[in-house]
Image (cartoon, rainbow, N blue to C red):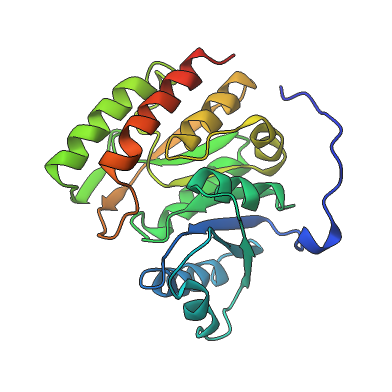
């Protein structure tokens, strides 16, 4: 189990009202894709029996991401926008988690590649007591509605091979749709340090090392153009981060 440690309380201005579920969306230059994702996500959540909120973490966007959010109509569930000055998707997700008091917390990508309806099964499993529930494009029953390019698929295969050194029982560590027990993940992320695209492998590895389980939910996933991942810029760094994670204890 996770050891409970004393931490300084967050400033009041950083805290949000407690809800059953907070869905974090890290955003870096997502002016084009984010508004439709927010509309679909908040409409889905409003029809569910759990209390919920969406938290957009702006990661130093240089486009009109925040302006696009200002133009949205009043959402049917809570919508919060916070900033993260430390660059990287991992840093943005951690910022959302540590400022949350929700019973369950998770994150999804701004491209809405994983159907939001997947949350019904995710919440069922979290309520049953599982520590982490993640969407999977490679678990039995999953479907790839729109595949990635050959280059991205090749890089993904190499990444999965290295990720299996740390998490041999997980078929897909990189689908951007992961949800957790709130108290568990708030404690776990305090020891996470990777800001790049391997951040969720580190997060899942610490969940497992804390003695909790990770359940994969097969999904019908579609590749959506506009990813900020660059094989040239981010590929080698991600591989190096995976090796660091596998050697950590």
- Left or right: 40 as drawn, with respect to 131: left
Name the residue: 47% across, 16% down.
246
Q: Is residue 140 above or below residue 97?
A: above
Which quadrant of the rendered structure holds the N terminus? top right
Q: Nearer the viewer, residue 105 or 51?
A: 105
Count of numbered tags: 0
Q: Is residue 55 above or below residue 106?
A: below
Write down the quadrant of residue 171 in the picture.
top left
Quadrant where the C terminus sits is top right
Q: Position of residue 229 (x, y in %)?
A: 33, 47
**Residue 241 shows in the view:** yes
Foreground pick, 79 / 115: 79
Identify the residue at horizontal 57%, vertical 79% (top origin).
Answer: 75
Identity of the residue drawn at 47% across and 31% down: 201
Q: Nearer the viewer, residue 14 or 108?
A: 14
Which residue is located at x 68 percent, y 56 percent? 20
Residue 15 visible in this rendered orientation of the protein:
no
Q: Position of residue 118 (x, y in %)?
A: 42, 53
Q: Position of residue 82 (x, y in %)?
A: 64, 63
Q: Please determine whether, in this image, residue 2 is positioned above or below residue 44.
A: above
């Amino acid at each position: 189990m996770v050891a409970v440690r004393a931490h300084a309380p967050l400033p009041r201005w950083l805290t949000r009202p407690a809800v059953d579920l907070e869905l974090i969306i890290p955003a870096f230059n997502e002016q084009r894709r984010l508004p439709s994702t927010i509309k679909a996500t908040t409409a889905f959540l409003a029809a569910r029996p759990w209390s919920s909120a969406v938290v957009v973490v702006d990661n130093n966007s240089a486009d009109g991401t925040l302006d696009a959010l200002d133009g949205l109509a009043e959402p049917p569930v809570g919508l919060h926008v916070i900033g993260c000055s430390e660059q990287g998707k991992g840093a943005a997700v951690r910022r959302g988690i540590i400022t949350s008091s929700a019973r369950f917390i998770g994150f999804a990508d701004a491209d809405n590649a994983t159907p939001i309806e997947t949350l019904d099964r995710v919440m069922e499993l979290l309520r049953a007591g599982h520590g982490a529930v993640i969407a999977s494009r490679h678990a039995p029953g999953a479907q790839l509605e729109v595949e990635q390019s050959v280059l991205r698929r090749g890089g993904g295969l190499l990444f999965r091979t290295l990720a299996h050194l740390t998490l041999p029982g997980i078929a897909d560590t990189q689908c951007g749709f992961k949800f957790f027990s709130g108290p568990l993940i708030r404690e776990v992320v305090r020891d996470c340090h990777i800001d790049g695209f391997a951040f969720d492998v580190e997060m899942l590895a610490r969940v497992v090392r804390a003695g909790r389980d990770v359940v994969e939910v097969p999904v019908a996933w579609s590749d959506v153009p506009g990813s900020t991942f660059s094989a040239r810029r981010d590929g080698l760094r991600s591989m190096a981060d995976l090796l660091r994670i596998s050697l950590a204890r």
